[in-house]
Amino acid sequence: MANDPLLQPFRLKHLTLKNRLMMTAHEPAYPEDGMPKARYRAYHVERARAGIGLTMTAGSAAVARDSPPVFNNILAYRDEVVPWLRELSDACHEHGTAVMIQLTHLGRRTRWDKGDWLPAVSASHRREAAHRAFPKRVETWDIERLIQDYADAAERMQAAGLDGIELQAYGHLLDQFWSPLTNTLDAPYGGSLDNRLRFTFEVLSAIRQRVGDDFIVGVRYTGDERLEGGLTAEEGFEISHRLKASGQVDFLNVVRGHIDTDPGLTDVIPIQGMPSAPHLDFAGEIKRRVDFPTFHGAKIQDVATARHAIASGKVDVVGMTRAHMADPHIVRKILEGREESIRPCVGANYCLDRIYQGGAAYCIHNAATGRETTMPHTIPKAAQGRRVVIIGAGPGGLEAARVAAERGHRVLVLEAASDAGGQVRLTAQSERRREMLGIIDWRLAQCEALGVEIRYNVWAEAEDVLAENPEVVIVATGGFPAEDQPAQGHDLVVTSWDILSGHVAPGSRVLLFDEAGDHAALQAAEIIAASGAELEIMTPDRTFSAEIMAMNLVPYMRALQRPNVTFTPTYRLESVQRDAGELLATIGSDYLELDQQRRLDQVVVNYGTTPMEELYVALKPHSCNGGEVDYDALIAGRPQAVVRNAAGGFQLFRIGDAVEPRNTHAAIYDALRLVKDL
């Protein structure tokens, strides 16, 4: 471990980082009233306690009121932020972790109807596609005001005891001045590269006048927009040299690409099925040319890649942000020689996609992330071990088994299939989503190490469960595709699961009707489209795939935007019948009386799932609680104590899709929240 490149200290001006791993600036959307209160603090302290060298708070703390917080950002323009950040920085410093914050003005990357309803402002009137605001073009008085806003915010961060700040300059206001695509100003702030950089260097000068030369200031920026007419790599190299030569910047944090569209954002921050570390070589080229402290992070989700980034000299500090959301204890496990036990980031991007939908960031398979004040990352032992029987080895069942075993209980899992995984294994049939198996594989390894017994090929009946003399039974049987829709002709259709599993081959003229709006439909659509079939994807919703969020939608669209695929929102499959050797589908609408028809050779439907609850219902009379959950106790973190049948021999619970159709994260959260208190 002593020679591990990741564990070597790094000197940045007066500050020594104890290792080369960092959480890059990101906004998990945990602030309350714009302040980083207990929940926000606990999230960062958990990673500091485990040994990370640098944690960068906020993805874009807002420096001004006309940069409204579309991602529930920290409001750095308020004086009251100082004591909250002081508590956070002090708590992290106790563990030897440096703390910085990213400051920004979002410019056009926001909306006018957020916050105080002030006009969005940018270096042109050009709208950003992602947020749809047409900004006002900045005026001289705006520039003077914004420079002071940046300086005021930096002074607050210094007062809060942070080790430094980072200015965000890709996709946000500073970069909107840099890029020829978003700067239509006249001199002195528009035209030449000198003019387009003027605002940034005036901001840096004002900040330095406030915080002095010792306070650390860095810039996170794109060195190449990869857009026709945008910033080129050569301009990025020149900007990098100028930032260094200014003497006002202490580190460069390099990215590549643009974030004004969903596809652009997804290329900058890749998700599963996309190449790992796609911009690392480019960051390394900037470091080689400029010879200046260089940070970088973009889908560096495993320790081996991070180690290579440092050992090869490409960067000085490497960001593993989503990886630390999946497992906050990466550094501790490296130090203890337990790398194999690191919970893997599977690239599902549930975290970021939730933020861009206006929600808080949660890891798809670590339900404690973002809930550190109520959910444990390290499971405490129970006062007394119990016999726990779990039916179903999908993500929820395996999480229940893992947590119960960590508690010290004796755990048996009964699984009907020959392999664990449930719907995740079906999802992973698509090569692009193969990484999802990491959710299952990690839990299987943990369960094996903890002595959990798993019996496969067991279709459990009530008597099988009772024969095990359980004290707790958890039904995690999941669901199965709805089989009674459409009302007329449901025996003539196949499901998205049939296509995904390979049990049914795609037809040549296919209607895929999607009422659930989840991954199963578009994964099936990818298979059908790749076969060359004529495919129509139809949904009654006003937009298709409503449950698939922005960045996850990008790879699907890249696969499905082809001549043989059409999308039809706001229409409904009413019925299917046989007619002259074909299928005749009748199409209706929720908006008006309609009677259209399609002649096809295959109809694929995706109505979601129905809970597989027969075993649960059969066990209820034998249980002491009748399956009842005390929700107040569940939410408060108290043990379940409901007794409806004193003669019952065990507590009975069900989790995940066995309750109602939801998603992988919900099943895992169900398990953790319940079982941590058994």
Image (cartoon, helix red, strand yellow):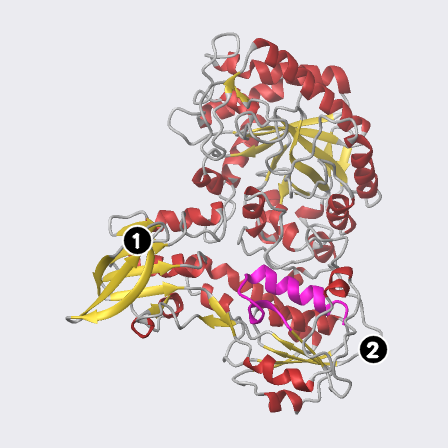
Callout 1: few (<14), some (14-19), or many (20+) C-alpha neighbours within 10 Å?
few
Direction from residue 564 to residue 463 in the image, left or right: right
Q: Height in image: 190 above or below 560?
A: above
Three-letter residue code for mark 1 = Glu
Q: Height in image: 188 above or below 472?
A: above
Q: Residue 388 location, x and y as percent? A: 70, 80
- Highlighted range, magenta: 654-678
Direction from residue 23 to residue 281 in the image, left or right: left
Residue assigned mark 2: 384
The one nearer the camera, 135 or 598, is 598
Q: Secondary structure at mark 2?
A: loop
Residue 657 part of the magenta-drawn span: yes
Query: What's the magenta bit mostly, secondary-structure-wise?
Result: helix
Three-letter residue code for mark 2 = Gln
Q: Quadrant of residue 151?
A: top right
Residue at the image point whose x is 61% and y is 52% from the top: 303
Q: Quadrant of residue 163?
A: top right
Residue at the image point whose x is 16% and y is 71% from the top: 581
The one nearer the camera, 316 or 659, is 659
Q: Secondary structure at mark 1?
A: loop
* Mark earlier in primary sequence (1, 2): 2
Residue assigned mark 1: 593
> Residue 506, can we see it?
no
